[in-house]
Image: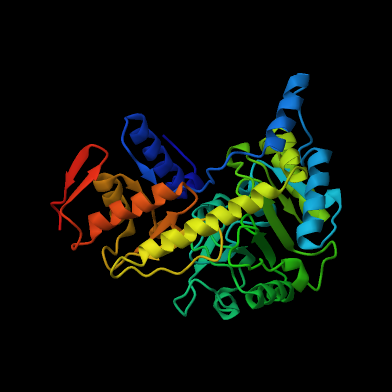
Amino acid sequence: MSISQIARTISASPTLALNEKAAILREKGEPVIHLGGGEPKSRAPLDAILAVAAHLNTGEIRYAPADGIPALKKAIIRYTDENYGRLVAPENVIASGGAKQAIMVALQAILDPKDEVIFPSPYWVSYPEMVKLCGAIPVAVPPEDGTFYPRIQDIEQRVGSYTKAVMINSPNNPSGVMYSEQFIADIVQFCEKRDLYLIMDDIYHRLVFDGKKSPICYQYAKNLAENSKLILINGVSKLYAMTGFRIGWAIANKKLIEVMTNIQGQQTSGPSVLLQKAAVGALNGIQSGVENLRTTLENNRNVLVDRLKTFEGVKVSKPDGTFYCFADFSAYEKNSTKLSKFLIDKVLVLTMPGVEFGMDGYLRISFCGAINEITEGIERMKWALDPNSPNELYIGDRKLVRDWL
């Protein structure tokens, strides 16, 4: 069978593959604990459900504009004004099938083959593959100081003649760190000076802890005219626990949004009108659910970090936001894929191997689930790894005997 050169370079999504494995094990009745997930367990807002139900009851489920229905654009404009202090026009907005599609069509609109896109490491697993789908080259930049916090010098050193864009995700998946105000200011001004596109993936921007607030990229931009190369990405998946609704958006200059709309129109004809109605309901409805989720996640984070600190040799940085912790388990096993497989095989705990995020020896552990799952999952992991733990463990009625240490 003949497949394209680009297709041969693209890997399957490891997060989706592990989610599928967990689902299969659960269908078999196995007591799997999923600490690798990327979606909150709270229900979608009632306002979103009522909005989609009301439109469904009309029976008028038709095509929508490729760039989004007017009601959703209006809600996104208001959201941007309230949360970013910037009032944009409808022509500056495109609604897509999730923030992931918004990023993808942005990359397709700006990249030529052999162009380079720079992003700090660790990074979301899809960034390299999305860039490669455009025939371009992903360039991951690990911070030289060994932390998860990049410095502008790290980015500057990797920018070359083929660099077309920089992509920033803060608060960051997988590390949970929120980049400093100084770094965001520096990267915005650097990209303006070098005439580079800057894609700000802000999908977690309100899920931050300890009274902190995410820096707002627009505050540091000197050029917000229609030749600006700043692209802001957001969506309803994380804040509103609406991952399955697949609605995200991009805000950029009008010409770029026009090109992105042309691309999206040829790909999917735009998101489902039903799901857009749900997003309108969420954005315009009661907002207390976002703060409730944030508070729950902050508590879950505290519990998880405290438990991880009881592991001898594990290095953990306290996340500033998101619902992920990126812990260094290299004292136990430097091959994170091997370690992740070991944990699911031996104690039915699913974690994400750090190598998929650009840093081997680490595991991404999610704390968006129930607190009892977090505590039991970490207890199982410690039993499997810590030679000082008891030799036996019960999972339900099943007795496990450790014979590998």
In the rendered image, residue 2, in percent from the top left (x then y), is placed at: 44, 37
| Residue 237, visible in the rendered structure | yes
* Quarter where residue 252 is shown: bottom right
* Quarter where residue 309 is shown: bottom left
Q: In this orientation, which residue lies closer to the viewer: 92 or 310?
A: 310
Work out which quarter of the rendered image holds the C terminus and state it: bottom left
Work out which quarter of the rendered image holds the N terminus and state it: top left
Q: Residue at left 50%, top 50%?
A: 368
Q: Horizontal placement of 259 versus 393: left or right?
A: right
Q: Horizontal placement of 187 versus 356: left or right?
A: right
Q: Horizontal placement of 149 versus 191: left or right?
A: left
* Quarter where residue 167 is shown: bottom right
Q: Residue at left 63%, top 50%?
A: 239
Vertical placement of residue 78 versus 270, above or below: below
Specify the farthest residue to the left.
403
Vertical placement of residue 87 versus 242, above or below: below
Q: How is the image coloured?
A: rainbow
Q: In this orientation, which residue lies closer to the viewer: 155 or 52?
A: 52
In the rendered image, residue 153, in percent from the top left (x then y), is placed at: 57, 81
Q: Residue at left 57%, top 78%?
A: 151
Specify the farthest residue to the top.
59
Q: Residue at left 76%, top 28%?
A: 63
In the rendered image, residue 310, in percent from the top left (x then y), is placed at: 32, 66
How many discs mark residues in the rendered view?
0
In the rendered image, residue 160, in percent from the top left (x then y), is placed at: 59, 73
| Residue 358, visible in the rendered structure | no
